[in-house]
Amino acid sequence: MKRAWFIPILLALISSTQLFAEMIDGELTIDNTKRTFHFYSPDNLPADKTYPLVIVLHGGKGMGQNMVRFTKFDDLADRDSFLVVYPDGWKRQWNDHRTGEDLPFEKDDVKFLSSLIDYLVQKHHADSTRVFVTGISNGAIMSLFLVQEIPQKIRAIAAVCGSIPENYFSTYHISKPISVLMINGTQDPLIHYEGGPVGKSGWERGATTSVDSAVQKILAINQCSKRDSVFRFPDINIKDDCTAEKMIWKCGENNVEFIKIKGGGHTWPGGLQYLPKYMIGTVCKDFNATSEIWNFFSSQIIRSELKQ
């Protein structure tokens, strides 16, 4: 009898002091529509603390679950004790407010993602002051749009293979300086480095401004002037037909960083060649985007801690 009572009491004590590793397939009802997400919490996190949250947004026609395998943020979350959520866009698309006839923009994704942040803060130990957003392609553009709409909820963003849409570039503004990392390939066949229509000829998926113009816009928002440094990644894989360099601007309490991949395509650096090169270009293997993004985000955490 003693053992029968002892085991549940012990389990209750453990569950009240630690969070266990789990991937939760969850949903929220937003405007009478069920919206889904996939949330990962590492093993053995003390339950009396809060943790950084990284929101990972898929590209057009993608899904949150694909980004789990594609980015492998869970591995870094296990190592460095942060939370990750992979939301699903409506009909595999984010409403990033581009204009285009082929864009199924039916839902308010700012409302969904803002509500998701609130839910994870209230129910799953996410720290409201350490929320970060990253994404690729449509997810990158959504990251840039989201930080304009709810800057008070986001500490920093990282946009991979994205830029600011032409239809709101002139009015694009973030109400406070914020750290931004952009990663773009010069041979991206879908979000063109020089700007223009998104995708292949005949697509009606809006247009983006040039990557250089987007970077300059972000620098102006952060009141950055002189570039502080340039780091050239070693060309460790000469077969990937690309090289990369990182430009860094230190702007008061924030950083703006831009990784320019010469010869890079519409891909996640260090990731998979998920479609043939003739469709999406080449994957740069000289660095890992997931590691670079987390290093960028974690540097914002260190800056905040040093201020306290």
Image (cartoon, rainbow, N blue to C red):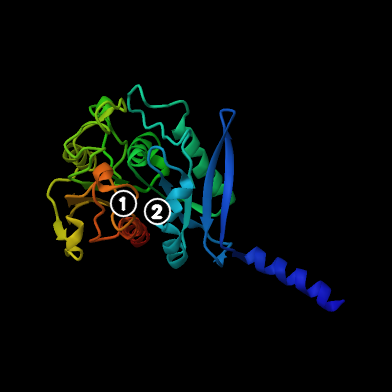
- Which label's residue is closer to the chain start, 1 or 2? 2
Q: Nearer the viewer, residue 99 or 201?
A: 201
Instruction: Tell me the quarter of the picture where residue 216 sits.
Output: top left
Mark 2 Cα-neighbour bin, 10 Å: few <14, some 14–19, many ≥20: some
Q: Nearer the viewer, residue 39 or 128?
A: 39
Number of dots carrying numbers: 2
Q: Nearer the viewer, residue 202 or 287?
A: 202
The residue singled out by tag 2 in the image is 70
Residue 233 percent coordinates (x, y): 18, 62
Quarter assignment of residue 95: top left
- The percent coordinates of residue 126 (x first, y second) are 51, 53
Residue 229 x, y percent position in the rendering? 14, 57
Identify the residue position indicated by label 1 in the image. 268
SS class, disc 2 = helix
Dot 1: few (<14), some (14–19), or many (≥20) neighbours within 10 Å?
A: many
Amino acid at the residue labelled 1: Trp
Toward the right, the furthest residue is 1
Left or right of 2, for residue 60: left
Up-down: is 206 above or below 272? above
Kindly indicate whether the residue at mark 2 contacts the one at mark 1 (C-beta within 8 angstroms). Answer: yes
